Amino acid sequence: MSASVDTASPTIRRLDQWLWFARFAKSRSLAARLCNGGTVSVNGTKIRKPSHPVRLGDLLVVPVGKSRCRLRVVGLGERRGPASEARLLYEEIEPPTREPRAMPDWVPLLE
């Protein structure tokens, strides 16, 4: 009896791998650091594990420079290809929003 090989597309992908495939990180280790830092959220939940599963239709918030991109996963990808191929893995829900400057925990009384 021969074993059949399932060549169907995956239904889930690791978050760090997806971020790398979609070119939100230059390397997979940098994608894992994004996840560990809690800067990426999936479906409204901040993620701290690079192994968090990503599925089609998930809503992600990803930092890009000093902005945040809100996007929907429309493809899981098979490899890290050119930028034109990476762009097919997601759709932007709204234009990137610039993050407001963080307020300090204290404000000096004398300036």
Image (spheres, grey):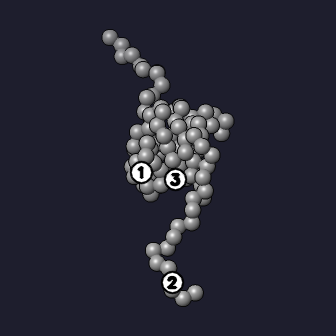
Residue type at tag 3: Leu
Name the N-terminal-most of marks 3 and 1. Answer: 3
* Mark in front: 1 vs 2: 2
Q: Secondary structure at mark 1?
A: strand
Give the residue pinned by disc 1.
Answer: 46
CA separation in Å, label 2 and label 3: 36 Å
Residue 97 vs 110, above or below: the answer is: above
List the single residue furthest toward the front: 109
Residue 64 vs 80, above or below: the answer is: below
Residue 36 numbered mark, or none: none
Give the residue pinned by disc 2.
Answer: 108
Location of the C terminus by quadrant is bottom right
Name the N-terminal-most of marks 2 and 3. Answer: 3
Q: Secondary structure at mark 3?
A: helix
Give the residue pinned by disc 3.
Answer: 30
Query: Badge 3, how many Cα within 10 Å: few under 14, some, many 20+?
Result: some
Q: In the depicted view, which residue is nearer to us: 103 or 67? A: 103
Q: In the depicted view, which residue is nearer to us: 67 or 6? A: 67
* Residue found at x 54% / y 88%: 110
Check contact, mark 3 vs mark 1: CB within 8 A. Answer: no
Percent coordinates x, y for residue 43 in the rendering: 43, 42
* Residue found at x 32% / y 11%: 1
Q: Quadrant of residue 11?
A: top left
Name the N-terminal-most of marks 1 and 2. Answer: 1
Residue type at tag 2: Pro
